[in-house]
Image (cartoon, rainbow, N blue to C red):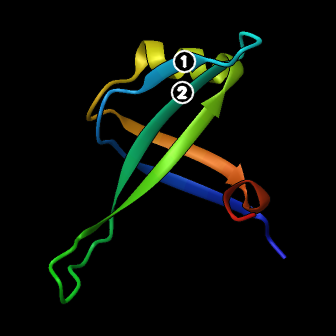
């Protein structure tokens, strides 16, 4: 069984950097993924909420912005618990 997922899409808004109580960096953003077709209800994209931690969170907040093309990968267990 393959437990990896790779997503490539554009950020729908600027990433939000915040810190936990112990100072760990956390960044949240949403990726819009183009489906390549339109459904019956007119939807042509999927919107995936993403959370990035530690150094990757700081880099994402510093270098990415609304509309940035972003690629991300994760283990399946991180996405569906």
Q: Please tell me whether mark 1 sits on a helix, a strand or a loop.
A: strand
Q: Is residue 26 above or below residue 36?
A: above
Residue 2 appears left or right of 31: right
Q: Please tell me whether mark 2 sits on a helix, a strand or a loop.
A: strand
The image shows residue 34 at horizontal and vertical percentages of 31, 62
Q: Residue at x 52, y 54 (%)?
A: 7
Tag 2 residue: 27
Labels 2 & 1 near each other (Cβ < 8 A): yes
Which quarter of the image is occupied by the C terminus?
bottom right
Between residue 5 and residue 50, name the one nearer to us: 50
Q: Residue at x 59, y 55 (%)?
A: 6
Say the numbered circle drawn on residue 38: none
The image shows residue 50 at horizontal and vertical percentages of 53, 44
The residues bearing labels 2 and 1 have C-alpha atoms spaced at a distance of: 6 Å
Residue 50 appears left or right of 42: right
Residue 32 appears left or right of 71: left
Image depth: mark 2 or mark 1 in front? 1
- Write down the quadrant of residue 52 in the picture: top right
The image shows residue 43 at horizontal and vertical percentages of 21, 74
Q: How many marks?
A: 2
Q: Earlier in the sequence, mark 2 or mark 1?
A: 1
Q: Is residue 11 above or below residue 43?
A: above
The image shows residue 13 at horizontal and vertical percentages of 29, 34
For disc 1, the neighbor class at 10 Å (few under 14, some 14 to 19, many from 20) is some
Tag 1 residue: 18
Q: Residue at x 47, y 49 (%)?
A: 49
Which quarter of the image is occupied by the N terminus?
bottom right
Q: Residue at x 26, y 35 (%)?
A: 67
């Amino acid at each position: 069984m393959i437990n990896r997922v790779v997503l490539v899409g554009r950020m729908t808004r600027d990433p939000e950097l915040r810190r936990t109580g112990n100072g760990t960096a956390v960044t949240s953003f949403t990726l819009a993924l183009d489906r390549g077709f339109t459904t019956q209800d007119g939807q042509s994209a999927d919107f995936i909420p993403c959370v990035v931690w530690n150094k990757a969170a700081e880099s994402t907040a510093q270098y990415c912005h609304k509309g940035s093309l972003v690629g991300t990968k994760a283990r399946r267990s991180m996405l569906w618990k």
